[in-house]
Amino acid sequence: MNAAAAVRADRVTGLAAELIRCDTRNPPGGERPVIEPLSAVLRELGADVEIFEPETGRPSVLARVGSGGSPTLLVNGHVDVVPVSDADWSVPPFGGLVRDGLLYGRGACDMKGGIAAAIEGLRACRDAGVVPPADLVFHFVADEETGGRAGTEALVAAGLVRADAAVVPEPSELQVGVAERGSLMVEISVRGRAAHGSDPAAGHSAVADAARIVSALHLADFGDDAHPFLGTPTCNVGTIAGGTAANIVAAECRLRVDRRVLPGHTREQALASLTRLIDAAGDFDYETHVVAFAEGSELDAGHPFVAEVRRAARDAPVRGLKLGTDARFLRNRLGMPAVVYGPGSMTVAHTADEHVPIRELVTAARTFARLYATFRGVTAS
């Protein structure tokens, strides 16, 4: 029996459902419930397991199958999930319910389903009697949803990430992701001058100025050439808050902006592109505060590892992702060839009634089984 043929739908679905039932919402950041179930299944499959906890209460599972003397393939997946509003769900968000061929629950798609598929690939190799020619390393990490500081970024900083190549099983609709946008989150504080609402011309409205800034930034064209996989950058003005009362000219207003950037753009370049558009729109009294920045990243689509993953995935197409993943730390800081490949779609990630098709869990697990059975290291193109 080949490894892919040993994949079992009931098993990968059962594991994904078990992981979903572990409430690991971030914020506030509670990954601990999933650590023991993951550790147990990995140990049962012969892995050496350790727990990495750079911050109290923020553990990650690190596991290795192999002697340490072979080429190494890394699977990096995050175990935290975004919060839920129970009232918006038609099923229990942490129930792991199966209905009409879909597995429901927070994290089903993003990305406990992908983690389960990666583990099922290893179990299928064992059942088929296939010994992977390379060492397999699994990093199931905390804190991806709020930036990775206590997860993959901390692992990289500690020198604990060493591999020849990596797969991040985020939902990619079973396509091979080679590029992703970065994100600059900025708060813009606009100042005005208060006056009585009966005579608005006597003051200067920060809300009116903020409205002009919103018009300048939202859906703005920043003049970038289109990326072959990522298109052009975007800007979303997501929140606005200001003023004191309807009968007072607003003295202040605050905007929160999400500016997506292409690979290679720095924090400084992204911020400068925002302020240029603001300054061109008018003479405003404002300040910017960078809330967060995550760089974009990409791997050459012609890299041999991309071709190897595509073969394992039965010629899956190559794509880009408009959002970001922990692959950026591997590509940008370590120069590691890393792709994103997993079941499910980002269009349902972070939504109510999040789900993943069981047939995609099975397909992804078969891809991982084939990749584990054939990976012998890569040579950069």
Image (cartoon, rainbow, N blue to C red):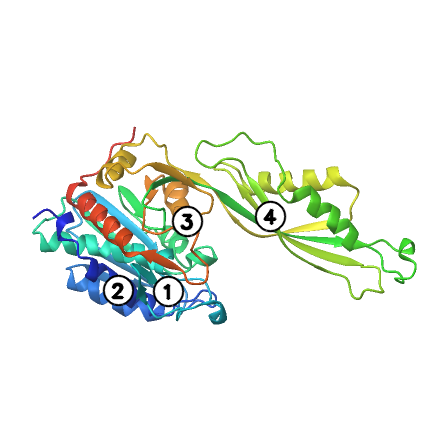
Distance from disc 3 to disc 1, alpha carbons, whole Å, reads 20 Å
Task: Kindly identify which residue carries mark 2.
Answer: 38
Residue at figure coordinates x 80%, y 59% from the top left: 250
Image disc number at residue 236: 4
Image disc number at residue 105: 1
Residue 296, percent from left and from top: 47, 41
Vertical placement of residue 145 versus 245, above or below:
above
Label 3 SS: loop
Q: What residue type is labelled 3?
A: Thr
Residue 38, percent from left and from top: 26, 64
Q: Can residue 109 be seen in this view?
A: yes
Image disc number at residue 325: 3
The foreground one among 180 and 39 is 180
In this image, 335 relative to 11: left or right? right
Of badges 2 and 4, nearer the viewer stands 4
Distance from disc 1 to disc 4, alpha carbons, whole Å, reads 28 Å
Vertical placement of residue 349 versus 323, above or below:
below
Image quarter for residue 377? top left
Q: Is residue 78 visible?
A: no
Distance from disc 1 to disc 2, alpha carbons, whole Å, reads 18 Å
Label 2 SS: helix
Label 4 SS: strand
Task: Look at the numbered discs 1 and 2 and tell me whether their residues touch, using CB distance below 8 Å.
Answer: no
Q: Split into 4 quadrants, where in the image is the C terminus? A: top left
